[in-house]
Structures are given as structure tokens and as C-alpha cells.
Amino acid sequence: MLRETITTERLVLTPLTVADADEMVSVLADAELYEFIGGEAPTLAELRARYERQSAGGPGAGSSSEEWHNWIVRRAEDRAAVGTVQATVVDAGRAADVAWVVGAPFQGRGYAVEAAAGMVAWLRERGVAELRAHVHPEHAASARVAERVGLVATGELDDEGEQVWRREFAGPVVAGGGHGPGAAGAVAVGAAERTEADR
């Protein structure tokens, strides 16, 4: 899959680069973001190293077992970074593990739902038939994002004790669906490292 920009009604999702760390380090600085996922805010050096790994697009040279797709979520009006979304595509492109994070100052505005919906539409257009997300059982806000983009709680817990959410698509992809505002709206009403989660 190509690294592409995704546009929604209020947001632009741009493929992640190492240079984005300079802006994102402040977006990810609030300790509140790590209440359910553990760890702490990364330093600039740590974030640059993480983004260098993530922007490689996969686990290693010559490996085709999975594809990494990471986007910086930016407001369309001023291109300010507000968070990230990501998808790890596996099973020969048939399934993807998805995640999202929005910085604390930008929460409560529907950005997580809108960005995740845009990503889901993009993945669906490219033949992904199953989506999975892993959400802490007490992380109600992130669970609402998963629900709004059509995922359903399975009752299963992963090895880290997180609830597994899943969505399976039936039928072929509709050609010409696009991945702009209309496509996102078709996925949800309204507008990786997998350790990053959203509120």
C-alpha cells in the first residue's frame, strides 16, 4: 500500500516522518495520556527514534509479514498537529490492527473519531476486510471511538489485559468510494506503536 494523505471534513492525515517528532513531542507530553497504557511521555530523542522505526513501513528489510501505516493528524485550517492514527496491516493485506491518540489539549472535539473513520475508510478501499483494536477495559473514551467507527467489543482480552475490538466487512469494496469526507462519513456518524491510545 502506498503512503498517502487522507483528508476528512476538518482534518488532514499526513504520512508520518521523523521530522514530525519536533512538533509531536509537545502533543504527547501530557501525563494524562498514559493513565491507561503505562509508560511516560517520550523525550524528543526517543520520539525521533520511534518515528524513524515507524516510517520504515515494516519490521525489517525483506519482510512482508506486516505493513506499518502511521499518520500525523492535523487540523485542516492551520495544519497544527493534534495526534496520530496508525494501522498495522497483516494477513497479506486482509486485516489490520488500528490505534489512535489525540493530545490532551485537543480532546473532546471529535478529532479521534473523525481521524479514525478516515483511516478505516482508506483501509477498506484497499481491501482490508477485518479491523482490530486493543483498548484498556477502563478506557471509556477510547472505547467510544472504537464503537463510533464500527468496531464491536469481543469480550476477549489480549496478553496485556486489553479488550479486543473487531469489525469485519462483508461484500466487495465499492469502487470510487474515495477517502475524503464522504468516505469517512460512510464509516461513522459525525465527523504504531500500539501503546498509544486515545481519549
Image (cartoon, rainbow, N blue to C red):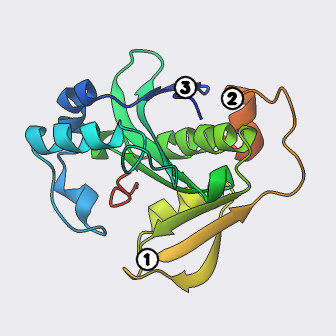
Give the percent coordinates (x, y) of residue 158: 46, 80
Mark 3 secondary-structure assignment: loop
The residue depicted at 74 percent of the width and 38 percent of the height is 125
The answer to whether residue 42 is left or right of residue 146 is left
Instruction: Tell me, for residue 162, which label it has, or none.
Output: 1
**Quarter of the image where one finds residue 103:** top left
Q: Secondary structure at mark 1?
A: loop
What is the quadrant of the N terminus in the image?
top right
Read off the residue under disc 3: 4
Badge 3 local density, few (<14 within 10 Å), some, or many (20+)? Answer: few
User: Which residue is painted at 64% across and 67% down in the image?
Assistant: 166
Residue 77 in sight from this viewpoint: yes
**Front in this rendered view, residue 49 or 35:** 49
11 versus 155 height, above or below: above
Residue on which the image places disc 2: 179
Q: Earlier in the sequence, mark 1 or mark 3?
A: 3
Q: Residues within 10 Å of mark 1 (few under 14, many from 20)?
A: some
Against 126, is 92 above or below? below
Tag 1: residue type?
Answer: Glu
Marks 3 and 2: CB-CB under 8 Å? yes
Q: Nearer the viewer, residue 156 or 146?
A: 156
Q: Secondary structure at mark 2?
A: loop
For marks 3 and 2 on the same chain, the one whose residue lies earlier in the sequence: 3
2 and 1 marks in contact (CB < 8 Å): no
Asked if residue 76 lies left or right of residue 95, the reply is left
The three-letter code of the residue at mark 3 reads Glu
In 3D space, how far apart are the residues under numbered discs 3 and 2 (Cα atoms)? Answer: 10 Å
Label 2 is placed on what type of residue? His
Residue at 52 percent of width and 55 percent of height:
65
Q: Residue at x 61, y 37 (%)?
A: 118
Q: CA distance from mark 1 to mark 3?
A: 30 Å
Q: Quadrant of residue 34?
A: bottom left
